[in-house]
Image: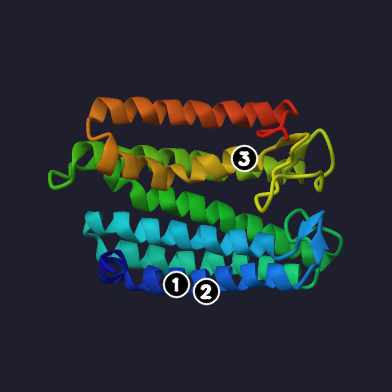
Amino acid sequence: MYFLEELKYRNEVLYYFGLVCLVFAVACLVLSWLIPTQVLGTNAWYKPFKFFLSTTIFVWSMAWYLHYLNSPMAVLAYSLGMVVLFTIEDVYVLVQAARGLTSHFNTTSSFYSRMWTLMAGAAVGISLWTLVVSLPFFMRCFPDLPLAYLWGIRFGLIIFVIFSLQGMVMGARMAHTVGAADGTPGVPVLNWSKVNGDLRAAHFWGMHALQALPLLGFYLLRNTYWLVSVSILYMAFCILIFFQALAGKPFIKL
């Protein structure tokens, strides 16, 4: 497959790390069918499945984009850093799921408190390091890239960083649900609350701007004006559902 071959050429570290995470995601999905353990009202294995799959999508996206910077040492350092930081997060989520326990916001013991702090630090590190390594996209011209595609990458990175750091709001509240305790009935797999506000919806949509906007810029909205307009609307949508969640209203009410 061309994409995977090219991805491996562009960034071997993140290619293999993403592949490993994809294997773990599939394994967690299979375990969700075999093991009925519940955490906060949903199958315990859904959370590590989502984290490993999201990690694959993110690191493969960054592997693809950072190749354009032609900065091998900075990109290698970033790639190795992402392996370490994501491993801290994903492995702990996996271990806690296997034990039938929560990972996020769990401070029921001194060990869990330290691990929660470490996870939060890793998440912030991922966001800030991604911002720093991506700065050349905003400081340099890339004449070989279609302009709409380049602006898709730029807006994707901006929105990703903002809404990945939005996780700090959840951390400050020690919950992702607004208006009730975590664990209220949620939509399948994603488990966003169907009856209360859920800050994870804006977090999800904002972070995946990193894939959506460059793809739109490359394949569909090849006009820069339209790409910028859609990007602004996309950001407005994410902001809207963030404040909707803060008001205690669900993203999807079923």
Quarter of the picture containing the N terminus is bottom left
Q: Can residue 179 be seen in this view?
A: yes
Along the line of sight, the residue nearer the viewer: 151 or 39: 39
Would you identify the image quadrant in which residue 47 lies? bottom right
The answer for how far apart the CA atoms under marks 2 and 1 are is 6 Å
Task: Give coordinates of residue 73: x percent, y percent.
Answer: 29, 66
Q: What element carries label 3?
A: helix
Mark 2 lies on a secondary structure that is helix
Residue located 41% across and 26% down the image: 232
Q: Earlier in the sequence, mark 2 or mark 3?
A: 2
Q: Disc 2 marks which amino acid?
A: Val
Where is residue 102 shown, x and y percent of the image?
78, 60
Q: In this view, does 67 lie to the left or right of 231?
A: left
Which residue corresponds to mark 2? Answer: 23
Q: Does any portion of residue 95 appear in the rendered image?
A: no
Bin the neighbour count of mark 1 within 10 Å (Cα to Cα): few under 14, some 14-19, many 20 and up. Answer: some
The residue nearer to you, when weighing 120 against 155, is 155
- Image height of 215 relative to 49, above or below: above
Q: Mark 3 points at which residue?
A: 201
Residue 241 sits above or below residue 203 on the image = above
Residue at image coords 50%, 69%: 22
The amino acid type found where label 3 is placed reads Ala
Q: Which amino acid does label 1 sit on?
A: Leu
